[in-house]
Image: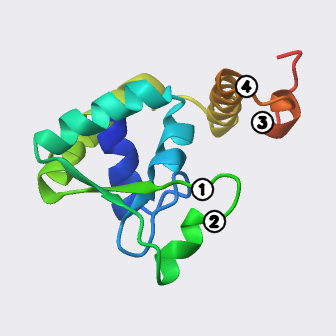
């Protein structure tokens, strides 16, 4: 469940482009699912559990105002999620541990190697999600 909290924290507080958060810090359930590559059922179970523990809130997207625009289109979502202060506190701790681990494991690598690592991870994410042109979209030479 840490992955859900980290994505919501990154979207709301770190300005991550994916998943995209509203000005109020809400992320649509669909954008969160796409970002995490979870099945809808698994994500639903995780969201219910995290909500019950007071880490986040799940609301229906309003039918009026700026938020209503999110409900339109083929990739619309009916609900959105926002991390709460309790969830932010836990996400900060998890993110801090991840940063320390990353520094220990990857700190001596060149930027070129890190860029390749990023591209490979992006390719894996796209393939899991079932994107047709994932190699080209990830910018990865399939000969790597």
Q: Nearer the viewer, mark 4 or mark 3?
A: 4
Q: Label 1 crowding class (10 Å Cα cut-off): few <14, some 14-19, many 20+? A: some
C-alpha separation, residue under disc 3 versus residue under disc 1? 25 Å
Q: Nearer the viewer, mark 2 or mark 4?
A: 2
First in residue order: circle 2 vs circle 4:
2
Residue hosting label 1: 76
Closer-to-camera residue (103/63) = 63
Q: Quadrant where the C terminus lies?
A: top right
Task: Name the residue: 30% across, 42% down.
Answer: 5
Task: Name the residue: 52% across, 59% down.
Answer: 20
Which numbered disc covers residue 138?
A: 3
C-alpha separation, residue under disc 2 versus residue under disc 3? 28 Å
C-alpha separation, residue under disc 4 versus residue under disc 1? 19 Å
First in residue order: circle 3 vs circle 1:
1
SS of the residue under disc 1: loop
Residue hosting label 2: 72
Residue hosting label 4: 130
Q: Label 4 crowding class (10 Å Cα cut-off): few <14, some 14-19, many 20+? A: few
Q: Quadrant where the N terminus lies?
A: top left
- Left of 87 or right of it: where is 137? right
Q: Label 3 crowding class (10 Å Cα cut-off): few <14, some 14-19, many 20+? A: some
C-alpha separation, residue under disc 1 versus residue under disc 2? 5 Å
Q: Position of residue 36 (x, y in %)?
A: 49, 34
């Amino acid at each position: 469940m840490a992955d859900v909290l980290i994505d919501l924290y990154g979207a709301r507080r770190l300005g991550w482009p994916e998943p995209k958060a509203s000005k109020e810090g809400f992320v649509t359930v669909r954008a969160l699912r796409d970002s995490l590559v979870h099945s809808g059922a698994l994500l639903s179970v995780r969201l219910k559990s995290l909500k019950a523990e007071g880490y986040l809130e799940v609301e229906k997207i309003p039918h009026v105002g700026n938020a209503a625009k999110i409900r339109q289109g083929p990739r619309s979502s009916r609900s959105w999620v926002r991390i709460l202060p309790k969830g932010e506190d836990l996400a900060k701790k998890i993110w801090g541990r991840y940063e320390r681990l990353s520094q220990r494991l990857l700190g001596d690598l060149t930027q070129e190697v890190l860029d390749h690592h990023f591209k490979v991870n992006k390719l894996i994410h796209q393939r899991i999600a079932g994107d047709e042109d994932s190699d080209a979209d990830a910018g990865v030479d399939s000969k790597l």
